[in-house]
Image: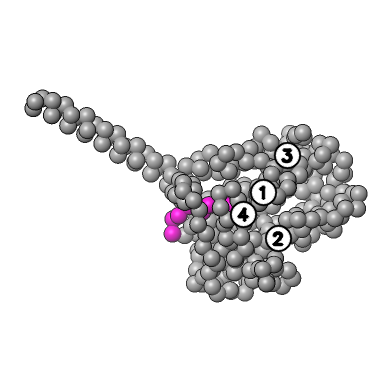
């Protein structure tokens, strides 16, 4: 009997050790990973305004006016509150104004960069990828620093946006760390040979700040982008309609010249005189605020990506 009890005790002890070991490995795998140091760079608020428009910050974070998307000067009031519907629940954009209590006014530059490019909050929690940091990870860190300098010049807005609730298991925020292992990558999605400076500028805008793939690329079961179908069109996240293919194929932008793409981004008019609609209205307004050379670079990149039917 004593031997049997010893054997059972040994098995229980071994099982407990294995469970604790797996828990420790899981805790390590899901831990937030951050940038430890910033590049030598003097942040430029004027350059940051360009990144502000390219990144579409106001499209999500400007406080809605009478339940509608903010326009004009109201787009500078980044108190959050707009909802983003998804298959996992509705996310609510937070206050990113320079308010020291309710916004990001008390954040250091390093905390801001880690939020934007690694999806980690100042208190060390994972952000959900409704915040497109997997795209922003491909930005130049210097551009992110410029963005923070510009945001600091905007009016502070008091009040926190409503919180959101997700169903289990999506409510386990720590699990986002495991998701990041597969989905957070700083490597370019598309490269050109030989390298082209204009296309590279466009890549930084499309793959990074502009986060175009977040809507135009289909996702897998757990919400990660399917890079084998890069920019090939996807179901709309709110369940209504479909986001179009913008690769250079027949139903994409193959029939559009680079000049057509540039004009569309500037004016909202397609080559056949149709007008921009839906969620793309806000994106087009952001693109119209960019320098002409940025729109030209975006067009060059879109003409250079692999065509996907």
Of residue 69 and residue 32, the one placed in the foreground of this image is 69
Residue picked out by circle 2:
53
Q: CA distance from mark 1 to mark 4?
A: 9 Å
Colour style of the rendered protein structure: one colour
Q: Is residue 180 magenta?
A: no
Residue 176 visible in rendering: yes
Question: Are circles 3 and 4 on residues that touch, CB within 8 Å?
Answer: no
Residue at the image position 80 percent from the left and 47 percent from the top = 299
Please tell me the numbered disc located at residue 266.
none
Q: Element type at marker 1?
A: loop
Q: Residue at x 67, y 71 (%)?
A: 65
Counting residues from the N terminus, which is met first, the one under dot 2 or under dot 1?
A: 2
Mark 2 or mark 1: which is in front?
1
Q: Where does the image place residue 37, in percent across and percent down from the top left?
A: 49, 53
- Inspect the magenta stretch and tell me whether residue 129 lies in it: yes
Mark 3 or mark 2, whichever is nearer to me = 3
Residue occupied by mark 1 = 239
Question: How crowded is the residue under tag 2: few (<14 C-alpha within 10 Å), some, or many (20+)?
Answer: many
Residue 85's disc is 4
Sequence order check, earlier mark of 3 and 2: 2
Q: Which residue is mark 3?
A: 232
For numbered disc 3, what is the local secondary structure?
loop
Element marked by disc 2: helix
Q: Earlier in the sequence, mark 3 or mark 4?
A: 4
Question: Left or right: 195 with respect to 60?
Answer: right
Q: Residue furthest right?
A: 272
Tag 1 and tag 4, C-beta contact below 8 Å: yes
Q: How far apart in space, not on screen, are marks 3 and 4 (Cα)?
A: 21 Å
């Amino acid at each position: 009997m004593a031997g049997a009890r010893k054997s059972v005790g040994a098995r229980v002890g071994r099982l407990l050790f294995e469970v604790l070991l797996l828990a420790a490995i899981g805790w390590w795998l899901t831990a937030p990973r951050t940038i430890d140091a910033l590049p030598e760079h003097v942040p430029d608020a004027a350059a940051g305004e360009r990144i502000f428009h390219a990144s579409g910050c106001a499209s999500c974070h400007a406080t809605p006016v009478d339940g509608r998307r903010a326009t004009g000067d109201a787009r500078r009031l980044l108190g959050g509150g707009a909802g983003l519907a998804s298959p996992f629940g509705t996310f609510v954009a937070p206050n990113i104004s320079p308010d020291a209590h309710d916004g990001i006014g008390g954040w250091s530059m390093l905390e801001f960069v880690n939020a934007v490019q690694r999806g980690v909050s100042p208190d060390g929690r994972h952000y959900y990828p409704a915040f497109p940091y997997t795209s922003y990870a491909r930005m130049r860190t210097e551009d992110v620093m410029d963005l923070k300098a510009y945001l600091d010049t905007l009016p502070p807005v008091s009040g926190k946006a409503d919180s959101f609730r997700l169903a289990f298991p999506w409510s386990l925020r720590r699990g986002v760390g495991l998701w990041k292992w597969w989905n957070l990558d700083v490597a370019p999605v598309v490269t050109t040979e030989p390298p082209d400076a204009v296309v590279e500028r466009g890549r930084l805008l499309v793959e990074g700040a502009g986060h175009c793939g977040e809507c135009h690329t289909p996702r897998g079961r757990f919400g990660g982008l399917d890079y084998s179908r890069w920019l090939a069109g996807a179901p709309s996240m709110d369940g209504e309609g479909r986001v179009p293919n913008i690769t250079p194929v027949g139903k994409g932008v193959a029939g559009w010249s680079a000049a057509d793409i540039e004009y569309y981004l500037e004016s909202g008019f397609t080559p056949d005189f149709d007008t921009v609609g839906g969620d793309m209205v806000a994106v087009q307004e952001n693109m119209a605020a960019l320098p002409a050379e940025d729109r030209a670079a975006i067009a060059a990149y879109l003409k250079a990506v692999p065509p996907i039917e």
